[in-house]
Amino acid sequence: MKKLLFGLLTFGVFTTYAQEAPKVTSAIIALRGNEIEEAKGFIDEAAAIIETKNQSEIKEKILTKYYYNKALIYAKIAGSPEGNIKALSDNANEIAAESILDLLKYESTLKKPRYSENALREVPMIAYNYLVDAGASYDAKDYAASYNKYMAAFDFKKNELLGNVAQLDTSLLFNAGIIAGMSDDQESSINAFRTCLDLGYTGITYTATYIASGQPKTYPDKRAMEKDIELGLASNPIIGEDVRPGIYISLINAYKKIEDAEMYQSTLVEARSLYPENKDLLDIQLQAYLDKKDYKGALANLDEAILKNPDKAIYHFVKGNILQTELKDLDAALVEYKSAVELDPENSDALYMCGLVYIDRANKITEQMNSLSLSESRKYEALKKKQKGVFEESLVYFKNAREINKDDLDIVRALAEVYRKVGEYDKSMEMSELLK
């Protein structure tokens, strides 16, 4: 009787001990037959059993098969183009990634790993599934979800359990930073971009035409591309641009949005020192000076911009505006406006501002006239004649500006005033009617 009881007890323990094994085996058979729904059902049943036990209670061979095949099944679900398969799990790719890592962690304690090498070959597919999901969320304008998928891919690929396969894929981090900004998550955007810069991300791409196919081929680095070219396997090498100036610009804009003046300024200074030739950074610094009303700094910045961009009229125009409106240096302002007109003859704004400088000069003459006594009639008449000449000079610029831009009411208003000042009353009335 004791023997029978012992036998029954032993059988019961063995049954409890090994009940996950047939579930794992059934899941593997279903997976090989591409019966994904059935495979998921069996592996989930195995999971429910395994989760109630300690690892020491499960056979090593069964547990490694469980982790590995669970990763394969859920990766298949995540990457399936069939809607009914993909609908089997909302977080299939996360489960696949977690299972890979669980396997690698467990097998790192074994003398002879069984599936680690095969599992590592699945890493690119799981990372790709994250990107597909990120793209789908982006297309649906769910930018927060898209950001989370990019970050999940980044965190998965850099996990130390992946050993030599682990990598800091900064391109994923770069995209995550862009999308975080689009979701108005400035803090996450800043963290992503700052990390990209700290990790030395450049975004430079290396492509060449692969001669055998005639199609472009992307290379991981310059050396790999040059090797194919030397061997005659590729031609027409193209090296992309360094995106770091753009990353700095995104960082600067993010700091501005969250009103972190200290980080805005320090990052701008850092970027300008690293990329002094970048026009966009130069323009941002110029605007920063203008926002602070630091006209001395703005003028120095403008002189640098003019030196580096001698064909750009806008810098002369902005410099003229500062000299005229803020520093009241009309002569210097006129020089800059005229330079802008020379570089861009169709610039109606620059022509208009030239005219305004002459009006400012005429107004100064008015002040002189008003300061004279009644006995100084000769001086008064001389100044009046001089003033009319100044108005006539301004008239040339306003007329030219209107030929370019007939819809600008500021130009029409200026013409109405100047025509009246020079005694052409009919034309002044004509302009006044246009204003009505």
Image (cartoon, rainbow, N blue to C red):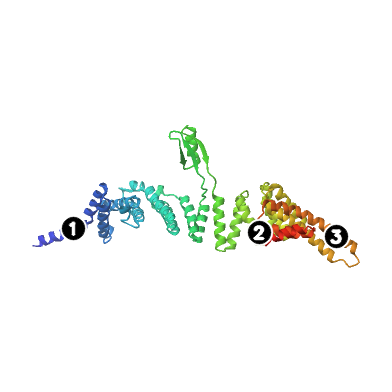
In percent of width and height, residue 46 lies at 25, 56
In percent of width and height, residue 194 lies at 52, 56
Rendered-image quadrant of the C terminus = bottom right
Instruction: First in sequence, mark 2 or 3: give its number.
Output: 2
- On the image, numbered disc 3 is attached to which residue? 383
Q: Is mark 3 on a helix, strand or loop?
A: helix
Q: What element carries label 2?
A: helix
How far apart, in angstroms, are the residues tagged by discs 3 and 1? Answer: 115 Å
In percent of width and height, residue 181 lies at 50, 58
Q: Foreground: 403 or 201?
A: 403
User: Can you tell which quarter of the image residue 289 is in?
Assistant: bottom right
User: Can you tell which quarter of the image residue 213 is in?
Assistant: top left
Of the numbered discs in the image, which one, if any, rests on residue 289?
Answer: 2
**Residue found at x 43% / y 33%:** 212
Q: Which amino acid does label 3 sit on?
A: Leu
In percent of width and height, residue 95 lies at 34, 56
Q: Which amino acid does label 2 sit on?
A: Tyr
